[in-house]
Image (spheres, grey):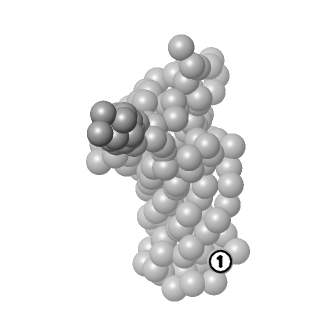
Amino acid sequence: MAGERGPVKEFIFLIVLLAILIPTAGQAGFSFQIALVHPPQVLWEKSITTPNLFSLAHRNSIYGVLVWEAFQIDPEGQLWLSKIKAESPSVLEYYGLEESRNTWVQQTRKIDSLKIRVTANGEFRLEFNQEKINLSQSVPDGTLLEIRTRKIPDK
């Protein structure tokens, strides 16, 4: 009988260990950053769990209509453009997409980072984990920003 308690204790220990480790699975050390390109400087940074999502809304400079872009951050911290929506089909056609306005168009485009020149009339707004950042009101007109992920070094 005494020998049977060993496997039971080991099983309980394994369950407790998994209960501790599973909630942190997928929390590879990554940060989500908004940075100045010149001079290089991180303006905003949050630790993230992966996978994750964020979106960018802006006014298209050619057609003057709103465009929404949705991005995914995969478990390796890589950015992917996942879908686009615009108020005008002309914008989607300009992007080489043939869909009607105000309909999300699915995409699977991997990007290293997202560089944008923020202008006041571009109305750039970023939404990340229910936090909304009005980039056009946060930096001077014409500022070049980079949106990216970075691996946090292991301790």
Q: Amino acid at mark 1?
A: Leu
Is 54 positioned to the left or the right of 40 in the image?
A: left
Is 43 positioned to the left or the right of 151 in the image?
A: left
- Please give the name of the residue rendered at 30% of the width and 33% of the height, measured from the top-left corner: 2
Is 130 positioned to the left or the right of 33 in the image?
A: left
- Please give the name of the residue rendered at 57% of the width and 84% of the height, measured from the top-left corner: 99
Which residue is at the front of the view, 67 or 35?
35
Quick one: which residue is furthest to the top in this view?
A: 155
Report crowding for label 1: few under 14, some 14 to 19, many 20 or more residues within 10 A (C-alpha).
some
Which residue is at the front of the view, 97 or 124?
97
- Please give the name of the residue rendered at 54% of the width and 75% of the height, measured from the top-left corner: 105
Q: How many marks?
A: 1
The residue to which callout 1 is attached is 97
> Which percent across, then down, holds residue 79?
60, 48
> Which percent across, then down, holds residue 135?
42, 39
Q: Taking the image as drawn, is residue 19 in sight?
A: no
> Which percent across, then down, holds residue 110?
68, 55
> Which percent across, then down, holds residue 74?
56, 50
Quarter of the image for the N terminus: give it.
top left
Which residue is at the front of the view, 89 or 2?
2
Q: Taking the image as drawn, is residue 18 in sight?
A: yes
User: Where is residue 13, by image quadrant?
Assistant: top left
Q: Name the element at disc 1.
A: loop
Is residue 154 placed above or below 147 in the rendered structure?
above
